[in-house]
Every structure is written in C-alpha cells, then in structure tokens.
Image (cartoon, helix red, strand yellow):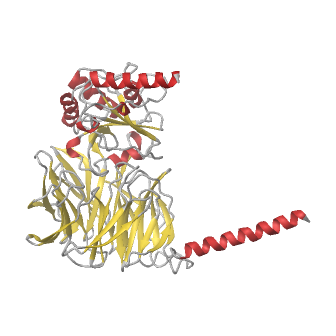
Amino acid sequence: MRLRLLATALTVALTLSLSAECYAAPKKLGPDGRVPAKWDQPKPLQVNHPDVAPLAAGGDGTGYNTLSFSSFDDGDMVVTGGSPTGHAGEWDERYYLGSLADKCIWSANTAPVNGVQREEPRKYRAYDNAWGLWVPSVSATKRTAARSYCKSQSGEPYDISSSKTDTSRWYCSKLAWGSYKSAAGIDLDADGGYWVWPIDLVNDSQTAVFASAK
Amino acid sequence: MRGKGVRAATAVAVACIALLAALACGGCRSEASHAKASEDGPVAVVLVHTKSGSELDVVDLSTMRLARRVKLRSLCLEIAADARTRTVVTAQCGGPDRSADDAAGIYRIGERKVRYVELGIPNPLDVATAGGVALLVHGFERSGRLVTTRMDVATQHVLGHGSLGPGALAPLAWRDGFIVPEIDVASDPLACSLVAMDRDGRASALGSLDARRAALVAPEAGAAGPPRLILSRASEPGSDASWSLARLGASGIESEAPISALQYGVADACMWGELLAVADADGVDMSDPGDTLWVFDPGTGEQKLALRIAGGMPAAVASWQGRLLVADGVSGDLLEYASDGRLRSRLKLGGAPVGSAALVVVP
C-alpha cells in the first residue's frame, strides 16, 4: 500500500514537473492539454565510454526494432543502439507525410561523397534498439530552429574527427548536438569531452525518452 | 513393454497431428506447392529485411516456392524491375558511417550474385526503371534539391546526375520516362505537383494537382495502360470525402472518382487485373500498423473487396495473372490471394516485423 502511494506520488510529481517546465508540441499533449508522464520513459542504464572517436559508428544496419514514429515532432531526435556507438538523426516534420518512406530525418553520413543528408524512418528500424528523444525545456520554436539548423548544414562534409567548435564538418550525433547548441544554447552531451556519441544524447539529463523499442 | 506402448501411442499421436495440420493448411497452399522452384518463368522478388540485413527472395510464381535467397551487401529500402532484361535494381542506401553505401545493385534473375555500380552520390533511397534506364533518387541535396542518378541497366553505366525538388516522392515509369510527385513543403496547406523526367534526365513540370499527397500506381507487370493516381486532400489520413482515384493521360488527369477514406494512407498499391488494390497501412506504429487491403473499381471508385490481414500489415503489393501478392510487414511472409479474394498460399520468408518491404514481379 505504502509502495503504491509512493508510486502514485512519484507519477503525479513527474507529470507536474514536466507540465511546469516543458514546452510540448501538439503530438505530445494529452486530451487535457497537459504533457502525460508517458513522454518521459525510463532511460537505459548509463554505460561509460571512453572519449574517443566512435570509429564503428552505427554498425552495419543489421538487427531490427519496432520504434513508433507516430509522436515525433520537429527537432525530436532518433537514436539507435545495438552496435558499438549507434546512430542519430533529427526529425523534420515538414518532410513527414505519414510514411516510413518519407525523407524526414537529418543526419550526417559518409562514404564516399559524404555529408549532411536526409534519411527515412524505416532506416532507423534496422538496428537492435532505438529511442525517440525530445528536449522538454526547449520551446517548440527553438526546436524548429534546431531542425532548421540541421537543414542549413545540408551537404556539408562528414568528419568523425571534427571538433565540437567546427561548424562546417559533422558526424551524426554531432549534428543533432550542434543544432541544440546553436538554436537553444544548451549542451546535450551527457559526459562532455571532445566527442559526442549518439548514446550521450540519450544519457543527457535534458533529454526525455518518449519512444523506445527493441 | 510399457515403453514400447507409449512410443507407439506417441507415434500415432504425432502422425494424427501431422495429418490434421496438413488438412488444416490444405486450404491455403498453392496447388503446385510440391513442384520444384524455378527461376526460368515468372517470379516475384521480395525485398526482405532480416536480422542479418537486407536480402532479395526470388519466388517462383508457378509454384509459389522460394527459388533463391540473395544477400545484399548493405541496407536496401527499395527495388525496381526491368522486365526486358529480367533484372532487379536495388537502391543501396546502407547504414551509417563505414556501412553507408552509394551503390545500385544489379541482380539478374537466375544468377547467384549481385553486381554493384558505384553512383558517386550517397544514400540512394528510391528507384524506378523505364526503357532500360534506372532512375535513383538520393536522400542527398545539392542547392536545395534532391540529387538523382540515371543508370543504364544493361551496361551498368551511370548516365548522369540530375535533381528533383526537395519534396520529391517515389518515381514511376511513364511514357518511356519517369513521373514523380513532388510536395511543396513550404506551402500551407501542402501542395502536390507532378514532374516528368525523360531518360536523358530532362525534367519538366506537368502541373499541380488539387491534392496534398499523391501516390502513383503502375499498370500490372507486362500490361499496358495509363498510370493511376491515388489523391488525398486530407490534412490527415482518415478524413472523409478526401480520397480519390485518378487516371493520368497525356494532358494530365483525365478522370477522377472518389473513394472511401483510407485510415492510414497508402503503404503501396497496384493494379489487380481491372481493379486497383490499395494497402491501407503505414507501419508507423507497429502496435497498429494498418491491416486492410481495399480493392476498388478504378473508374468509378466503387469498393469491390476488403481483404483484412489479421495480425499483419500489407506493406507491399503486386499482381500477376489474377493473383494478388502481398508482402506482410509484420510476419515477413508473402501472401497470395486468388481473384475472388481467397487466400491461396502463405510463404514464410523470415522477414523482421519492421513495417516495410518491397515487391516486384518479373514476368
């Protein structure tokens, strides 16, 4: 009984805290106009990683997950795992027409003419697990600005060794990280350091998980 | 003695179960399912994503048996067939970083391996073929437009690169070239137009459509006829009085008929003899991906059949000589329906439940 009361109190507190501090896009508002606690799902256990270049970023597109894309909004991030370092992209609602085949996710990729480009949601199902992330403390306007920042880097080259201060070369998670750094002035790299890994975006305390799947 | 009795009883029980299972499955098996699979005649090629990556599964349409599995070198999301050379072209977008790809795969039916042509532009996502030329649309922009590549299927040479608007959708073969719907994402509400591209890469506007979205439907494999369009004027799938079927002629849309609202949108569609089958599904949320195939008279929009795939999702469809083939995006199976809507066979291909697949028929 005591445990149930505690759980209820925690749920209410979580709902209130999300409602008080977050700016939700329409897809994440409940019928009562508030942000349900379900948009703050548990995060995976944090595993420390060395601050080195994620050389095997993303793995090879094998495995699968069933991540739901129905609640993604402008500026939300999709991160995949199941390989040494995963992959990351940022949602562009303007290019989403309701299909898994819409080219609506900005990311940076390589080989052989590399650069910032658009990917399809179904590509992100080809990994062992995936998360949908949003940043509750950032307004919808700034989230859209973050997405626009990704677009404005379109075609710029991929470079896994580029520093965080280099805004002309990118890798997948650095693009999403850089978009929020530029548009909202926040640092989403959970553990700091030279590189920002995809999983750092999941681990960061300012992001919330609204969708996850294996 | 007792052990022998138990074994005998077990053997009888196993035999009975096997017999019952065979009888139960009899109604959904192809009549020729015991024949050997061949790749010499008409085949269906299914793009399947398995836990170990993308593969092409070649299915003999005379026996509905798997003739061959061909592993692809990287992640692939779309395929197209060139019937004249019995070739399937794959768009190899690959995964991120070192697994990224920029190639088109060339698979000739009956061969064991896929040849790859480096396109020089990353992330090919869509592909269509017309008159021996493949058009690939990349998820890569230059000057704000999506880059395209044209490739000669027979010689496997890149013919050149071009571009389409940033909202370009999947292309389709049309009048010795290609036709592509483009969405103007800057307009509110969204506006859709058609662009033609000839085999030399010259693009020309065919005019705007009174629709927010459009899906193109090719004639049945090996058949002539105009392409059809499924138009949506809805802001969201499921809205009433907003869907229609249109026939495309030389001067644009020649006729249009309203159809009942689709709940999810168009995962895929195909001509099925004289009828048009629409996969009302999206796979966006796999707990509710959409499970219905609507079959319409394309001239009047009258609904003729509704095929429900219980627990499944029609991710890709194609037809051949009165039979409707459906790639199930949940089970990964290939389903075959007779012209009266009866399920004739179900072939297990081992695909993962990812809500997408591609399917072509090579006559």
**Quarter of the rendering containing residue B272:** bottom left
**Quarter of the rendering containing residue A134:** top left
Name the residue at 52% across, 80% down: B32
Give the answer, above or below, for where B106 lies relative to A38: below
Q: Is residue B54 left or right of residue A132?
A: right
Query: x%, y% of residue B249?
Result: 12, 73
Q: Is residue B60 left or right of residue B136?
A: right
Q: Can you see residue A195?
A: no
Give the answer, above or below, for where A193 lies relative to B356: above
Image quarter (top left, top right, bottom left or bottom right) of the C terminus of chain B: bottom left
Query: x%, y% of residue A192?
Result: 37, 18
Question: Which of the pair A189/B319 is nearer the observer?
Answer: B319
Q: Can you see residue B276?
A: yes
Query: x%, y% of residue A214?
Result: 47, 42
Question: Which of the pair B260/B14 is nearer the observer?
Answer: B260
Image quarter (top left, top right, bottom left or bottom right) of the N terminus of chain B: bottom right
Give the answer, above or below, for where B2 lies relative to A59: below
Which residue is farthest front?
A: A1
Name the residue at 33% across, 32% down: A36
Q: Is residue B150 left or right of residue B93?
A: left
Number of marks? 0
Which residue is farthest right?
A: B1
Name the residue at 37% across, 65% down: B359
Question: Which of the pair A75/A31 is nearer the observer?
Answer: A31
Give the answer, above or below, for where B284 lies relative to B127: above
